[in-house]
Amino acid sequence: MSQARQHLAEQLAEAVAEGLRADLKHQERALLVVSGGATPIPFFQALAAMPLAWERVDITLADERWVAEQNSESNAQRVREHLLQGAAARAKFVPLTAATETPEEGAAEVGRRLETLNWPASVVVLGMGNDGHTASLFPDSRELALALTTAESVVAVRSPSQPLPRMTLSADRLHQARRHFVHITGEEKRAVLANALQGDDARQFPIRAFFACPLATYWAP
């Protein structure tokens, strides 16, 4: 990994930890929503080393592939392996999967589990794909319009461009967070983000759904 990406991960971890600490001064628990994939791994590792009252922190995911947690495609597995380590293992992690065959069958159970958390989230850390998707809000998904408009916490999503069905937090639930960060790397994603900033149709670039929020961008080559 480049030094720039490592430095970026450490800066983001400091900002996220600061946000969580700020909320823990006046509330019993703070909620952190993180994204999956490979990009956040150094951020997870840096955040796990931050001094925090981890036993008062809840963590969930912005989205998840509908696979067993032992599957290498599981975002939950990455969270457990890279973030819930050391003192950070005291945090409460709430996954977005259930013991059902499809996400459609499991959505109600996952939604009930999420309602036990302290919303709005203190911090949401989003990623972004080369197609402008964030969480599992994909431009080619039939469920995109629903995910962008529903007041429900989660939506089961299928996308022609993705081999696996998914569960995603709704745009509304992500929107409500007190702090929003987007964490991306590489020149291609910087160009996608710059392109997305030229318009406002979230159906074309779903990341646009969060431009109305104060959105801090963390990018490295």
Image (cartoon, rainbow, N blue to C red):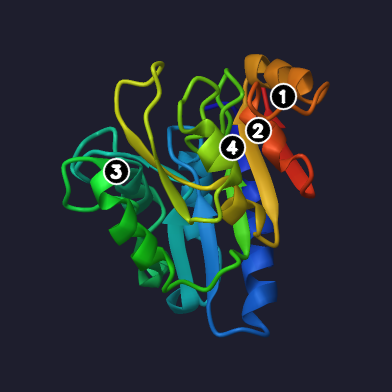
Q: Say above or below: 70 vs 27.
A: above
- Tell me the residue that label 3 is attached to: 104
Q: Is residue 166 left or right of residue 38?
A: left
Question: Which numbered disc flags the more N-terminal residue, 2 or 3?
Answer: 3
- Tell me the residue that label 4 is attached to: 6
The amino acid sitting under disc 1 is: Leu
Closer to the observer: label 4 or label 2?
A: 2
The amino acid sitting under disc 4 is: Gln
The amino acid sitting under disc 3 is: Glu
- Tell me the residue that label 2 is attached to: 207
Q: Secondary structure at mark 2?
A: helix
* Residue 184 rendering spot, x and y as whole percentages: 62, 31
Residue drawn 57% across the image and 18% down it: 130
Q: Secondary structure at mark 1?
A: helix
Q: Secondary structure at mark 4?
A: helix
* Residue 102 rendering spot, x and y as whole percentages: 22, 40
Mark 4 and mark 1: span between their CA atoms? 21 Å
Q: Is residue 156 left or right of residue 140?
A: left
* Residue 179 rendering spot, x and y as whole percentages: 70, 57
Q: Residues within 10 Å of mark 2 (few under 14, many from 20)?
A: many
Q: Residues within 10 Å of mark 1 (few under 14, many from 20)?
A: many
Residue drawn 36% across the image and 66% down it: 112
Q: Are marks 2 and 1 in contact (CB under 8 Å)?
A: yes
Question: Which numbered disc flags the more N-terminal residue, 4 or 1?
Answer: 4
Closer to the observer: label 3 or label 4?
A: 3
Q: Are marks 4 and 2 in contact (CB under 8 Å)?
A: no
Residue drawn 43% across the image and 78% down it: 55
Residue in front for this viewpoint, 170 or 67: 170
Q: Which mark is residue 193?
A: 1
Question: Which numbered disc flags the more N-terminal residue, 3 or 1?
Answer: 3
Residue in front for this viewpoint, 38 or 201: 201
